[in-house]
Image (cartoon, helix red, strand yellow):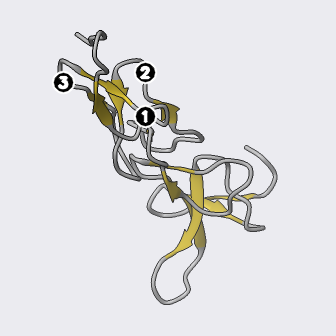
Amino acid sequence: REPVFGGIDSQGRTTCAEGACPLGTEEVSDFGGGPRWCRPCAVGRYRDTEMTSCDACPVGRASSEEGSEICTVCSAGKYAQLRGSMQCSQCNGGRAPAADQAACSICEAGRFAA
């Protein structure tokens, strides 16, 4: 473990001695101001080097695992319309994702999507 951690508390959580949790986690404390500990980001949320707490995945991206450092861009033919998506959805036939992969649009005349 990195030297900033104070150890493991009675509930098996990593505790923070200096307020620095690893990426994919955020620093929290129990109500009443107890010891601070590092909680993994929930599914659909992430924390990277630019952030101090977990945030919802942006549209067009998703995170299907707890403790994510990044949100994955939806693959070809898929989209994520809402912030905090846990998975990308498949566009229906005759539709394709927009450039930002936030929604599906009807294919232009002369084009198709399976």
Describe residue 61's horizontal placement relative to residue 105 as left or right: right
Residue labelled with disc 3:
92
Quarter of the N terminus within the rendering: top right
Name the residue rendered at 68%, 58% in the picture.
51
- Pick the residue in front: 74 or 35: 74
Amino acid type assigned to the residue bearing label 1 in the image: Gln
Q: What element carries label 2?
A: loop
Name the residue rendered at 81%, 52% in the picture.
3
Among the two numbered marks 2 and 3 on one chain, the one whose residue lies closer to the N terminus: 2
Quarter of the C terminus within the rendering: top left
Among the two numbered marks 3 and 1 on one chain, the one whose residue lies closer to the N terminus: 3
Location of residue 18 by image quarter: bottom right
Q: Residue 101 carries which label?
A: 1
Describe residue 108's horizontal placement relative to residue 2 as left or right: left
Q: Are marks 3 and 1 in contact (CB under 8 Å)?
A: no
Name the residue rendered at 58%, 47% in the picture.
24
Residue labelled with disc 2:
75
Amino acid type assigned to the residue bearing label 3 in the image: Asn
Frontmost of labels 2 and 1 is 1
Residue 78 locus on image (x, y percent): 34, 26
- Pick the residue in front: 14 or 52: 52
- Pick the residue in front: 68 or 10: 68
